[in-house]
Image (cartoon, coloured by chain):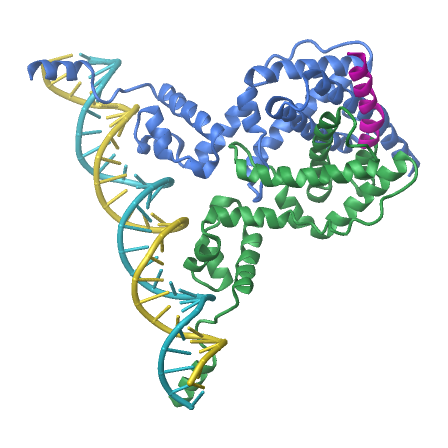
Chain colours: A blue, B green, C yellow, D cyan
Amino acid sequence: MAGAAVSAAAAPLRRRLAPDERREQILCCAVRLFGERRYSAVSTTEIAAQAGVTRGLVNHYFGTKRELYLVVVRRMLRVPGSAVTALPTGSLRTRVSTSVDWFLDSVSPHARTWVAVTATEGVGRDPDVEAILAEADEVAVEHVLAAVGLDRTLPGDEQRRAMIRAYGAMVKAATREWLLRDTLSRDELHLLLTQSLVSLVRDTFAHLAVAAAAK
Amino acid sequence: MAGAAVSAAAAPLRRRLAPDERREQILCCAVRLFGERRYSAVSTTEIAAQAGVTRGLVNHYFGTKRELYLVVVRRMLRVPGSAVTALPTGSLRTRVSTSVDWFLDSVSPHARTWVAVTATEGVGRDPDVEAILAEADEVAVEHVLAAVGLDRTLPGDEQRRAMIRAYGAMVKAATREWLLRDTLSRDELHLLLTQSLVSLVRDTFAHLAVAAAAK
DNA sequence: GACGCTATTGGCGCATCGTCAACAAGTTGC
DNA sequence: GCAACTTGTTGACGATGCGCCAATAGCGTC
């Protein structure tokens, strides 16, 4: 009994961690669970259990289950884009091709989480989630504009940005075809993304400028 | 008192409807509520209340809240696409342009519900919802293949279908830009969708065929 | 080794969901 | 016309999940 008491003292039932550390630990489990199942199919109890804590602590750190979810969404989008190396040079097609390659390279290591983030569409609007995704899209648009070398002060900038956002949706969908369904090889995906963006910039934007000048 | 009794008999508290009728009534309310709020923010109690029935009846007809939700998703995708009129003729660009116009015409009356259906979710996979959306996408792919006049037995069909699915994602995103954010005019949207599909078929598919023949 | 700070717990109250037996609105048979 | 049957509909029960908060117990500090 004395031995039991000693070992119990040596390994206390609750371990007290630094707030940041504990928060990170819970968030990590939440990312994994929300990544593999939908919102309603994940309970805060389960998240807490996986993190080795009680449910109350989850609420203590993140307030609400929904708030935790939003943090997870934000976190998952923080993956790529940190190492924006030197801008590519050369012809439009060369620059676009290089950028597409860079994108594919940066996605493939985090394939699983990336797919989860950009995953499903459904019914029911969620303004908060939409705002986070929109923010990430805006960053992507900036990258594309920089890669193709377009002046952002020119008239028609808003329209071009909208079109690039739409192009971004195709990028996501096509990349899912590659990573998830394996219906496209990397080369085929690369061809699609490059060709589409080149056509967008060279043809569609040109038509746009002509139409704007005509009126 | 006798009069009250008579009026009560004339207007009974519960009205007994035909199953299909009641089911449709509940489903209608569910469509509206799920259209304007996200899944977790809609309770079956509220749906029942809006339909003028009790919660138990909702479960009786649809089993589970989730099952009801899936029925809603399916229903919302039932765009009156039945009226697939005669296939357009003329050059590739003309046929694509006509098809894009037809699509935009058929979407705009149901703008609100359509936007709700194609709204992006966030994190968390939902295989059931994905299956429904995939089914609808496949129908759309068939329409596109018919419009551009591609033989479905040719080699590389799977790759082309995948690329058209990706194009479909761009169509949805761009249409949302038009309907929701008003960042594109209908003409600009039409230009984008037409130009992109023409480029996809004329350039990308051509490259694809060349690459396939080379190996 | 005692003290204080605070990370952590456990439980309370409330809302929602799925199930089911009982009830009553219509319908049919006589 | 009334009675019996069918079945659409209700109301309540148990279970689960979530937000909140006072009590508890690690861990650093003097």
Provide residue A174's location: percent of width, then percent of height.
68, 26
Provide residue D21's location: percent of width, then percent of height.
27, 40
- Foreground pick, B155 / B108: B155
| Residue A151 appears in the rendering | no
- Foreground pick, C27 / A95: C27
Taking the image as shown, residue A78 lies to the left or right of residue A104, namely left
- Foreground pick, A12 / A21: A12
Q: Residue at x 63, y 13 (%)?
A: A105
Measured along the vertical axis of the image, is residue A112 above or below residue A6?
Answer: below
- Residue B146 location, quadrant: top right
Q: Residue at x 73, y 31 (%)?
A: B164
**Residue A74 magenta:** no
Provide residue A182's location: percent of width, then percent of height.
63, 22
**Outermost residue toward the left in this view:** A1
**Residue B201 magenta:** yes
Provide residue B80's location: percent of width, then percent of height.
71, 52
Taking the image as shown, residue C2 lies to the left or right of residue A161, namely left
**Which residues, given as a range, are shown in magenta?**
B196-215
Q: Residue at x 66, y 41 (%)?
A: B136
- Residue A168 location, quadrant: top right
| Residue B187 appears in the rendering | yes
